[in-house]
Every structure is written in structure tokens, then in C-alpha cells.
Amino acid sequence: KIDLLERAIVFVFFYLRKIFLFFSILFRVKFIIAEPKKAKNILFDDTNFNASKILFKNKNYFILKTRIERISEIYLSKKIITYLLKNFNTRSIKQNYLAAMIISINPKNVVTIIDNSIDFFIQAKIFRKKPINFIAVQNAHTEDTSERVKKNRFMTKYYTFSNFEKKVFKNK
């Protein structure tokens, strides 16, 4: 009985959640049949946008929304769809879409102030051999991050508050 109950719970929370998210995106999001505009910088994750936009003096940046509930536009182009289909079995659709967007925008830098974003770490790993800087700016003290974040942490550059923070980061 417990095994059956566990399977039912997994089904409800895993599969039905995905179906619900799919339909929620389908009816809420604006689909743009075009490539996104080219930009020198990508602001990865629009959370705390007002604080993070000061990182860019010029207006040459693209805001890449990464949280499903905050996505308002989805770009569809031949390049993006081809990338999604080609990598369908390698990563989730979300991760493949973010990677396709980064390829289409062709930035020099991808910057985030959400320094414990697993989506950011995954994208940094995907593009580790490409000439794109993945820069995380420390948002808060990171001593008590989860094991999942510690395990997936990967970025090319990390800007911290102080030397103390650097020591904590290296030791953890």
C-alpha cells in the first residue's frame, strides 16, 4: 500500500506538475517567431533586476528570464528549434532552451546576481569551452548553501564581497 501511495504521489507532483506548467506557459506566454536581439551581455534571471541593471552602463544587454513563472516571452526560430531537437535527450527542455537563447544572442558575458542558481551553473558548464564569461556576483553570504548547489556550482568568474567570503567559498 505504501509503495502504491508513493508512486501516486510521485505521479501527481512530477508528471501532473509538468503538464500544468506546460498549459500555463501555453496560455500565458507570448510566442515570438524570431531570433532574440544580439547583445554583448545577458542578465541571467530577472529577479532583483533593479539592483542588477546597474552592472551595465550601456544598454547593450538582454534579460534572460529563467524562472518558469516569470517567463513572459518565448522566442522560436529555426536555430532555437533545431538546437532543442538536437539536444532533446541530453538535458531538460528548459536547459536546452536557455542554451539555445544564449547561442542566438551570442553574448560576451552572461551575468547573474543569483549566485546560487543551478540553472546558471548548468549553462556555465554547457559553454565552458566557448569564449563566453559566466559571471556571478555575490548576492548574500553563502556559507549555508545546500548540497545540491555545492555539487553543481560552476562559473568562470565570481565576484564576492570580501576576502572572508573568498575563504568561506573555497572551504565550502
Image (cartoon, grey):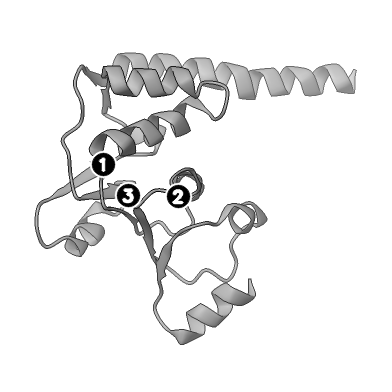
**Looking at this view, is 92 or 106 the one in front?**
106
Which of the marked residues, 1 or 3, is nearer the chain's N terminus?
3
Tell me if label 2 and label 3 are in contact, CB under 8 Å: no
- Number of the front mark, 2 or 3: 2
Q: Which residue is mark 2?
A: 129
Q: Which residue is mark 3?
A: 47
Which residue is drawn at the image coordinates 35% and 14% (left, top)? 26
Left or right of residue 35: residue 128: right
**Label 1 close to label 2 by CB (< 8 Å):** no
The CA span between labels 1 and 2 is 14 Å
Q: Is residue 69 left or right of residue 13?
A: left
Q: Position of residue 145 (x, y in %)?
A: 58, 62
Check disc 3 and give the amino acid type.
Thr
Q: CA distance from mark 2 to mark 3?
A: 27 Å
Q: Position of residue 102 (x, y in %)?
A: 32, 39
Q: Toward which corner of the image does residue 112 lie, by quadrant?
A: bottom left
Q: Secondary structure at mark 1?
A: loop
Q: Which mark is residue 57?
A: none
Q: Secondary structure at mark 3?
A: loop
> Badge 3 local density, few (<14 within 10 Å), some, or many (20+)?
some
* Residue 162 drawn above or below residue 85: below
User: Which residue is drawn at the image coordinates 55% and 57% (left, top)?
Assistant: 153
* Three-letter amino acid code at the position of disc 1: Asn
Q: Where is mark 1, residue-wise?
A: 106
**Amino acid type, mark 2:** Lys
